[in-house]
Amino acid sequence: MASLKEVKRQIGGVKKTSQITKAMNMVAAAKLRGAQQKMEAFRPYTAKFNAAMGNLSGNMEAGQFPLMETREVKTVELLVITSDRGLCGSFNANIMKTAEKLAAKLEKEGKKVSYVCVGKKAARYFRKSGKIRQTFVDIMSTFQMFNARTIAQDVAANFIAGNADEVHLVYSRFKSVAIQRPESEPLLPVRPLVETGGEAQKNVVADYIYEPSPTEIMEVLLPLYLNVMVYHAMLEVGASEHAARMTAMDNATKACKDIISRLTRLYNKARQSGITAELMDIVGGAEALKG
Amino acid sequence: MAEKIRLEVVTPRGAVIQKDVDIVTAPGYAGDFGVLANHAPLLSTIKTGVLVYKVDNADEFVMVSGGFCEVSNNKITFLVEAADRGAEIDVERALRAKERAEKRLAQAQQKTEQINIVRAEAALQRSLARVKAARR
């Protein structure tokens, strides 16, 4: 049986751990609220943006824009977005697993795969694969459109230069606080949006006055569209990260509680047996004196 | 003016303005243009500049930075990267930003760093527009 002192020290240690995990849980909860608010605020922008894009691309041939050009796919780039920090359960691992699976599938088809990593976790994980083209780290804690733009520009330039024939986005979608699902979706070439707004929009397409010409607007809009996509993915990952951390830390706090109650029982048992032993000694001593 | 047009300014951080207004003057790609109620459907890119709208004969100024706007169904929607109402702009801060951008621009021109120039120029334009929107 472990000594009394030893068990007591262990209880103290676990208690301190649970204090930390509990605090982290609360911090994650607060940050999650912030991230969710940002996502909420961004939603009308994306909705309107997609509607306008749908409007435009309805009467546009895809071939004339470098960002929409479909080529024979030989090289594929995966834009993997993870968090900068760990301690959030299997969250980052899930994203990376999805990315690797996709990469394996693509390589099987004889395509070359390269990575662009956003977030420290992805950068560290894929470093040994030697396929990283570019990394962006330490930007996930502050959501800035500006960061998304840098990433989007980099990826777009690489695509236009012909170094990648297709770009996929791998990130985690925020379904709810309990569910975050790793997902991948094609980013480049940009496919014309197929009637997001339904019938009503289809009818007004032809009536629009375009200032300047539709083609020129499209040229401005396409890079913006990439920004929006990347920014959106970053927001989703951000919210997912905090939600995942909340759950992970909640579980950790619960586990701490279990350990503490087990150790306390152990401690009491040890104390009890100690008292019993001492009593036996005293009784034994008294008996001997009597005799 | 009886008839009004619905003005919406939306940025990635949320909607900044949702109002029924009399007239909107926007910094379009080819110059400023005005939009009244029942305007024909329009799609235009927007430069960094000052958007003016009029409600009850009072002009209001808003700084907007790059994006585009859409007019349809008597509604004008601006999708821009940033938007600040004139009344809420901190002029001191905008002026400081302007000086910073100018300094950086001067530096960048010596060293010829491409990205720096583009960014500094955008920053300069934004700060100028802010000052303009706030001063009026």
Image: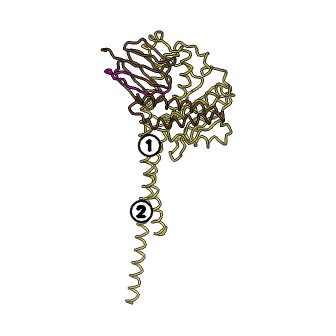
Image spot of residue B86 (x, y percent): 40, 30
> Residue B132: percent from the left, percent from the top?
45, 28
Q: Which range of residues does the magenta coloring cover?
A: B53-66
What residue is shown with label 1?
A31
In the image, A2 versus B92, the foreground residue is: B92
Say which of marks 1 and 2 sits in front.
Answer: 1
- Residue at 61% across, 16% down: A64
For disc 1, the neighbor class at 10 Å (few under 14, some 14 to 19, many from 20) is some
* The color chain A is rendered in: yellow
Residue A24 in the image, given as x and y percentages of width and height: 45, 49
- Kind of residue indicated by mark 1: Lys
Between A20 and A7, the one lying in front of the other is A20
Please give the name of the residue rendered at 50% of the width and 45% of the height, measured from the top-left corner. A88
Residue A264 marker: 2
Task: Tell me which corner region of the image, top left, top right, bottom left or bottom right, holds residue B25.
Answer: top left
Amino acid tagged 2: Thr
What shade has chain B been given?
brown
Residue shown at the point (41%, 22%) measured from the top left: B52
**Residue A14 drawn above or below residue A163:** below
In 3D space, how far apart are the residues under numbered discs 1 and 2 (Cα atoms)? 34 Å
